[in-house]
Amino acid sequence: MPELPEVETVRRGLEPEMAGRIIKHTDVRRPDLRWPFPDRMAARLTGQEVLRLRRRSKYILMDLSGGETLLIHLGMSGRMTISPAKDRGHDAPQKHDHVVFDMSTGVRISFNDTRRFGMMDLCDTDLVEKHRLIAGLGPEPLGNAFDQEYLAAKLKASNTPIKSALLDQRLVAGLGNIYVCETLWRARVSPLRKSASLSSKRIALLRSAIRDVLTEAIESGGSSLQDYRQADGELGYFQHSFAVYGREGQPCKTAECGEKIHRIAQAGRSSFYCHKCQR
Ligand SMILES: [Zn+2]
């Protein structure tokens, strides 16, 4: 499932092909994904200039010249493919290409989603922050509002394990299971640790770890799992090396630790951690 760094990678891949370009034609090839598409979606998109592509949590926000914004979520298996302009026209859309944008440059952008947990919606650009899927989100983990004071106040007031707190999208937006596991290992905090019991010093380490882990993943082009592909139209198979995620039974990567990585279930999700390094 794409997490924040992967969504950011897709956004960065799409931006040069879409921003400042006009959507010449939109083909909406089914009535819904996870939810029905908005009314007259193709007509509302066709002819619009894409002003910019932004990201909020795991949503790509495409601001259009007519004053509306297209919200896109990749769900579990959604991906964007970019096909360069072709002299004799593009090949027929492939199975699971649900929405196809033909840009004024001849470039085709296809949204492909085999499992159809993705979504698209349109709303006034002025009202994006009030959209039902956006309104309740906490600050961006890489943004200025996610500062030490904020995180400390939230964690001190929490009575859940730190793993659950960091997955709570109201506390911080866009963190998912993979990067929370990686962050906790880097900060040497056990996923079972009660949030309120962390010292200010450890909260500062945790915050740095969140930002470092996400920034590094974005820089490496995002990780690639299962059927997720890069936005550049290629099968962007980045063999991202995780420190703990998916490494049950393998040795901890801390020098001279010697312990094996454990996997436990927490709130229905797997937590991978080293019970020697992480306290
Ligand atoms: Zn260890």
Image (tube, grey):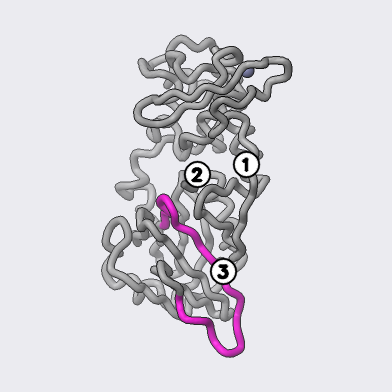
Horizontal side of 91 relative to 196 (left or right) equals: right
Disc 2, ligand 1: is the CB inside 8 Å? no
Residue at point 51%, 30% (across, down): 180
- Along the polypeptide, which appears first: circle 2 or circle 3? 2
Horizontal side of 62 relative to 134 (left or right) equals: right
Question: Which residues fall within the magenta stretch?
Answer: 72-93
Disc 3, ligand 1: is the CB inside 8 Å? no
The percent coordinates of residue 105 (x first, y second) are: 58, 79
Instruction: Inspect the image, locate mark 2, and give the three-letter code of the amino acid beneath it.
Output: Glu
The answer to which quarter of the image holds residue 168 is: top left
Closest to the observer, 256 or 151: 256
Instruction: Inspect the image, locate mark 1, and give the three-letter code of the amino acid beneath it.
Output: Ala
Residue bearing the label numbered 1: 217
Closest to the observer, 253 or 133: 253
Check if mark 2's residue and mark 1's residue have beta carbons within 8 Å.
yes
The percent coordinates of residue 207 (x first, y second) are: 57, 25
